[in-house]
Amino acid sequence: MKRTILAFALLLLLSSISFAEEAGSPDEGFMIFGDKNFAAEKTEESKWIFKTGLEYIQYTSNLPEYSGKFESVSAGTKADILGFGLGIGREFYFTNGFSSTFLISAVYQKSLDKSIGKAAEDIDYDLSNVRDAQYVYAYEASLSLNYLLDYKTVDVQPFIDIAGGMGYAEIEKEYIKKKEAPSDSANTTEDYDVKTKENFLFTRLGLGVNFIHFKGFMSYFKVSSMIVQVTDKETIGSSNLSGTTAVVDYDGKEKNLDETEIITTAQLGLGYYF
Amino acid sequence: MKILFIILSSLFIFLSCDTEEQIYHYNKYDDEYAGLVLMAAQECIEENDIFAALDTTNDFDTAEFKVNDVYKITRVADSITNIFFMKITAIATGTPDTMTVVLNGDGSEYDKIINFDSDLNSDMYDNIGLAACNITYKDIWSASGLGSSEQMTLVWDKETIQIADDAGAGDDDDDDDPEAYTEQTDSFRINRDYPLFFSYFNATYSSTILTDGSDSTVNKTGEMTISLIVDTDDDGNYEDEDECTGNVNCSFVTTGFDDCDIAVDTNIVTKSDYTDLFFSYVANTGDCKLIPEFGTI
């Protein structure tokens, strides 16, 4: 199902690019990019830009460690989170293809993964359930240095950018394991239900490339390395292991932290110069 | 339009972030398998409404049925309809609760006094739970309507091979089918409104019979339906007494018949011979014959 949705999304993306390219009438220079493309009209001047697209972050989980029969939690586990980003800014043209873009962006990322552990293929009994929910939002201001390569069909604009910002992350994991036989004692079940809430600051260094199409439509791809500093963290939840009735409580708050992590992000999307 | 395309694209990508997978921890060769089958059956019984509803029949004092309730049984087989009436003539609470039911077919050989108790009802309840929820018996039993709080259907597929393939008079065929067999399917409508053994009288029956030396099978069907025609409330008042006028008098004779106890096989879920019954009579006096599923009576 998810693959179908993703395939449909990619199809729509491609369609949108094609649609944009086909938007001009023949007398506007349709498909004659080298002769009458956006770069030719507005390259050597400053302009506004709007960007939106898919955002990926590999966020480091700070959930307490746990070792259950069917699920474990290790320190520093990376959580792959996808989301949606929006940015608006202005590109300032310098000279000879060099320009700089100042961009204000917001990112909302959320992933939900569920794993249902059936007892066996022919037994309709959910022996275990795992639910991983991750949710991150962040704001940033970035400044990039761009260089435009004016090709015939599409302009290519590699860039390097630096950014700073702040964000909030919630990482949650739920796991339960039920009894495996009616004769099992009640303490053979397992349970882990913990959520962390973190505020963080970050700086980011990115490398990317813009592909500028006809009439100001563009697409972009960027990878970045972020230094994330978690400033405060709240942990809520508890766990219980098989063979014991003891419940481990993780509730607690930590402030003025100085924990830093280096994480990877990637962006892929579309934009419009105006 | 362009912006719409972009927003839709992004939205679909965003929605694609959620994933769900299903894994299997064990297979039938693992030691844990047998215990997990029982856990699944237990969960099925605990989570489906019908079992809580049927459990109310185990307490005769608080169950839906009452003393003086009268039920009409309509039996159709071989295109002939027979009518019987059953009246709950006594209920006594105790350990276990007991009940007496009089089955009156207006002079037929199936007129009986039937003795039943809550332990037997509980055994039938357990049988129904196992048959409906334990996958060990899925080749014999199937169920539907488990989410209902009124009625479920339990189907019992029985087969008896009288003469195996390549034996007997018809041993010259080339197929792998038995030379003589009887297949029978009993489909019981099990309702919380009456004692569980009444389900025998609210069922459809079908049978396919191949006799030795025959090239074709014989099919038989029979159906019994039950309806409450005199509903006694907690104050002992009757309702729907119109059904008791004319040739049928609900104050019918309730004595002088064969006295029969009900017997319940607690291992019935494992059985699939076509002669096996949901319950049977044990005669205290006379010849306790159960109304047959098929044939003219």
Image (cartoon, coloured by chain):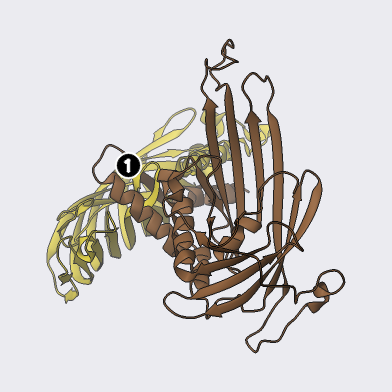
Look at the image and give the colour of chain B.
brown
Given residues B230 and A243, the one toward you in this image is B230
Please state the total of marks drawn on the protein image: 1
Chain hosting mark 1? A
User: Badge 1: few (under 14), some or many (20 or more) residues near its Cα, within 10 Å?
Assistant: some
Given residues B264 and B38, the one toward you in this image is B264
Q: Is residue B141 above or below residue B193?
A: above
Tell me if residue A159 can be seen: no
Residue at figure coordinates x 53%, y 34% from the top left: B160
Residue at figure coordinates x 58%, y 10% from the top left: B172
Give left or right: position of B254 versus B17. right
**Chain letter corresponding to the colour yellow:** A
Given residues A156 and B296, the one toward you in this image is B296
Tell me if residue A202 can be seen: yes
Q: Is residue B116 above or below residue B35?
A: below
Residue B54 placed where, x, y %? 52, 67
What residue did someone put label 1 on? A208
What's the residue type where badge 1 is placed? Answer: Gly
Residue A187 placed where, x, y %? 20, 64
Determine the residue located farthest toward the left in the rendered image.
A258
Give left or right: position of B89 versus B129. right
Residue at figure coordinates x 75%, y 73% from the top left: B252
Give left or right: position of B137 versus A258. right
Determine the residue located farthest toward the right in the rendered image.
B246
Given residues B267 and B139, the one toward you in this image is B267
Residue A116 placed where, x, y %? 36, 51
Residue A229 placed where, x, y %? 18, 63
Determine the residue located farthest toward the bottom in the rendered image.
B235
